[in-house]
C-alpha cells in the first residue's frame, strides 16, 4: 500500500492546530500570522501532524521577490514521531501543492536547536545560507520571547520585564510555487546565493506530548 493510500493532507482550522503548536512544537508559541494550515490524516481520520504557512515576520527579506510575488513563511511543522519513513516528505510536498499560486515561501531551521532543515532538503527547497543572529528579549516572569523587531512596539511596563539576549542563527530555505515561468522569475529575483545543503546530526527535542484533538469525523 502506498503512502497516498494510507494518508491524506487536508486544510485544517485553528481548533485543530492550536494545541499541536502550543504543546508539541519545540517553540511552544503561536506564529504571528497563519494564512493556510494543513493536517496529515490517517485512514481512520486521525490527525497525525500539522503544517502552517503565513505572512513572513521579516518584512525586509527578499524584497525583490515581494515586489512581484506574495511571500509566505512556513512557520510551523509538527508531526507525531510514530509516522513511517518518507511520510513527512509526502506531507510537506502535498501541502505545498495545495497552496495558492504563484507564491514564494521561506522557512528556517534553527541552528541553536540543532536543526539543519533535512525535511527541506528532502523536498527540494533552495538553501541560501545562515541568517545573522538576532537579538531576542525574554520575559523573566513568564519566559515568553519577543523578537527585536517587536520590542519597540511593546508597552514600557512589558519592556521593563524583559532580559536581552543573543539569539541563534538559522538556516534559510526558499521554495517557489507556480508555473515554470513564474518559478524561473522568482529564482532570478532571489537576493541570496544558492548554496550546498548543510549537513550534521540533528538534535531531537521532546515531542512526546499527545494532543487531545486526535480524531476528526466527517
Image (cartoon, helix red, strand yellow):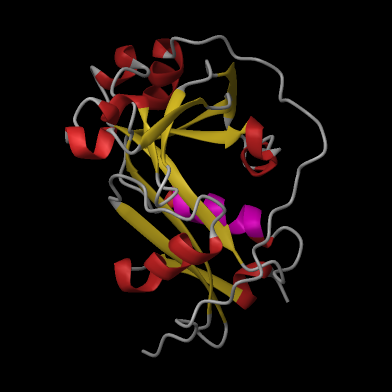
Q: Residue 127 appears in which quarter of the rendering?
A: top right
Residue name at image x 58 percent, y 73 percent: 7
Stretch of the chain drawn in magenta: 88-96
Does 92 sit left or right of 1 as displayed? left
Decide which of 102, 146 is in the foreground and name it.
146
Does 180 sit left or right of 6 as displayed? left
Vertical comparison of 175 with 133: above or below: below
Q: Most extreme residue toward the right, as rendered?
A: 201
Residue name at image x 23 percent, y 17 percent: 67
Q: Residue 151 appears in which quarter of the rendering?
A: top left
Residue 179, visible in the rendered structure: no
Residue 81, visible in the rendered structure: yes
Q: Position of residue 50 (x, y in %)?
A: 48, 62
Decide which of 57, 69 is in the foreground and name it.
57
Say which quadrant the N terminus sits in. Answer: bottom right
Does 110 sit left or right of 190 as displayed? right
Residue name at image x 71 percent, y 25 percent: 197
Q: Position of residue 85 (x, y in %)?
A: 76, 61
Decide which of 9, 131 is in the foreground and name it.
131
Q: Residue 188 appears in which quarter of the rendering?
A: top left
Q: Position of residue 208 (x, y in %)?
A: 66, 70
Q: How many marks are shown on the rendered structure?
A: 0
Amino acid at each position: 500500500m502506498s503512502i497516498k493510500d494510507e494518508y491524506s493532507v487536508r486544510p485544517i482550522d485553528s481548533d485543530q492546530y492550536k494545541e499541536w503548536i502550543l504543546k508539541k512544537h519545540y517553540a511552544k508559541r503561536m506564529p504571528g500570522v497563519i494564512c493556510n494550515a494543513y493536517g496529515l490524516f490517517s485512514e481512520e481520520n486521525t490527525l497525525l501532524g500539522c503544517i502552517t504557512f503565513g505572512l513572513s515576520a521579516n518584512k525586509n527579506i527578499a524584497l525583490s521577490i515581494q515586489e512581484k510575488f506574495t511571500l509566505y513563511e512556513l512557520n510551523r511543522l509538527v508531526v507525531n514521531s510514530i509516522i513511517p519513513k518518507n511520510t513527512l516528505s509526502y506531507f510537506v510536498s502535498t501541502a505545498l501543492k495545495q497552496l495558492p499560486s504563484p507564491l514564494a515561501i521561506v522557512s528556517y531551521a534553527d541552528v541553536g536547536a540543532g536543526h539543519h532543515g533535512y525535511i527541506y532538503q528532502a523536498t527540494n527547497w533552495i538553501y541560501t545560507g545562515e541568517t545573522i543572529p538576532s537579538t531576542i528579549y525574554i520575559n523573566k516572569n513568564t519566559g515568553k520571547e519577543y523578537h527585536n523587531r517587536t520590542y519597540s512596539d511593546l508597552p514600557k511596563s512589558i519592556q521593563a520585564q524583559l532580559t536581552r539576549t543573543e539569539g541563534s542563527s538559522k538556516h534559510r530555505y526558499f521554495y517557489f510555487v507556480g508555473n515554470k515561468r513564474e518559478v524561473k522569475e522568482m529564482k532570478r529575483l532571489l537576493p541570496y546565493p544558492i548554496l550546498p545543503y548543510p549537513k550534521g546530526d540533528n538534535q531531537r527535542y521532546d515531542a512526546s506530548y499527545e494532543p487531545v484533538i486526535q480524531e476528526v469525523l466527517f
